[in-house]
Amino acid sequence: MPTAAAGRRRLLQQAAWAALATQLPRWAWSQQALQHNPFGLGVASGDPTPDGVVLWTRVLPAHPADAGAPWAGPLTVRWELADDAQFQHIVQQGQASALPDLAHSVHVELRGLRPGRWYHYRFMLGDAVSSVGRTRTAPAHDALEPRLRLIHASCQRWEHGYYAAWRHARADEPDLVLFLGDYIYEYASPKDHTGLARVQSLRVPQNLADYRERYALHKSDPDLQAAHACAPWVVTWDDHEAQNDYADGHGKQDAAEWLPLRAAAWQAYYEHMPLRASALISPSFQSLQLYRRLAWGRLARLHVLDARQYRDWQACRAPGSSSAAAVRPEACADLTNPARSFLGQQQEAWLQAGLAQDAREPSLRWSVLAQQTLLSPRHYPSGLHSTDSWDGYPAARNRLLQALARQPPRNTVVLGGDIHQNYVCNVMGVPGTASEAAILASEFCGTSISSRAGTTQDKLDAIRRSNPHVLLARCEERGYGLSDITPKEWATSLRAIRNPLDAGSDAYTLARFVVEDGRAGPQPA
């Protein structure tokens, strides 16, 4: 009898096989007519390379509880990639297997495409046809593109607001979307519905089926679906994809209960994101390979980080507590323990090696750290230190800053999210070192798509007065960051939604900053 481990290894092998873009056999066209839309969660693409991209969808039964044939087994899904939205000029076509063990999700990894090109794609099952997605390949490795239009966003709690921000993001026609964490929230809707945009009836996830339902809820939003369909995405996670403030193998529960729950959360994440099968590095979903590098020719290189899977437990946090608290350094010696890591030692070394490589390539214009939260310190007037952000891992942050000071890339930009606030900062050197007064990088930490800030502007104004490296700090807006990147400058507009409780809300530009090539630090524009 096969063991459970053998079964999981077989699933990973099947997932890798299913991701291959195979040619379409004649028999795959003959499937029975369907009475519902099996592509109700939309389509997506991600992780573009110069010759390929990942295409994603998930096939849904007519009713969630329908486990009968053919939904109990693998399904053959057809796909097409074309130069045009009418599919008059099909570039590639083929089939993919939607496996029941992976919620009938589809991850097609295309190869052999031309660099720097836009394409259109769609999926078919029987006589059902998905919505049309638009994607593109990255430029050739040696190409210096004249522009990259990049959106970065995070944190989209269902109840706190509609996803009007995504409608405006789509209208901005990005080349690439970076999602930096908290795609779903694991909470149940509050009993008091006052001030909420909408509510949902799902329980706090307790198993894989619960996490799948949570993704299906979020992906049912038409504005989010349209944003996925407009351009390729590059995704990473934070905590709410599994549990608030978790850290590596530590959650609210003991390990025997937490690790299976975390594996369920991570499996559901893979099933619903446009990720490559190479992300599946553990047969029991006890790990996903999310930190990675993506190049946009010689214009930009993205270092995508994972600040949850490998971090140490938050300093002075009690076992079993539901969240990480702020602490006073004098009362928490563990805060400054040099052995503690935010990224894990292996990822730290990987990042430092990548930045050093960037420094050895002066023709590379922009080195981008795509990560979860605010890198720059926030010195609170109260003297408290957050323990769930980089502030809770000061030794790890100093190691990163020292690496940047030793071998600085031509230009470094840090993007983040998590805190539901807009911050624009000069990333300064390590206090007490020769680089203390140097601006090492430029930072744009974005607000949320919909999640509330949980603080007041008066408090942020006080933080800004105490932190001269903070150029802007705002908590009252929801929205996203829009960056136009050229060889000569990086221009970021902070896009804000006027009313997150209005699905049709308009948007405006809260502020705009420019970083000039060769001159670190954002300048108001």
Image (cartoon, rainbow, N blue to C red):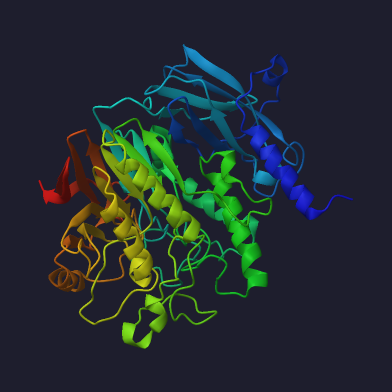
Q: Nearer the viewer, residue 63 or 235?
A: 235
Q: Is residue 99 visible?
A: no
374 on left or right of 285? left
Q: Is residue 259 visible?
A: yes
Across and down, in percent, residue 310 comes to 51, 61
The single residue placed furthest to the right in the displayed view is 1
Across and down, in percent, residue 315 comes to 43, 77
Q: Please report the residue visible at 33 percent of the width from the left and 70 percent of the height from the top.
A: 391
Q: Nearer the viewer, residue 432 or 149?
A: 432
Q: Please report the residue visible at 43 percent of the width from the left and 64 percent of the height from the top.
A: 342
So how many labels did they put on this image?
A: 0
Location of residue 383 with respect to 92 vertically, above or below:
below
Res 173 quadrant in image: top left
Location of residue 387 with respect to 74 vertically, above or below:
below
Q: Please report the residue visible at 47 percent of the width from the left and 20 percent of the height from the top.
A: 113
Across and down, in percent, residue 270 comes to 56, 47
The single residue placed furthest to the top in the displayed view is 88
Q: Please report the residue visible at 75 percent of the width from the left and 38 percent of the height from the top.
A: 73
Location of residue 76 with respect to 508 vertically, above or below:
above
Across and down, in percent, residue 211 comes to 58, 56
Q: Nearer the viewer, residue 124 or 316?
A: 316
The single residue placed furthest to the left in the displayed view is 525
The single residue placed furthest to the bottom in the displayed view is 331
518 on left or right of 174? left
Location of residue 233 with respect to 339 vertically, above or below:
above
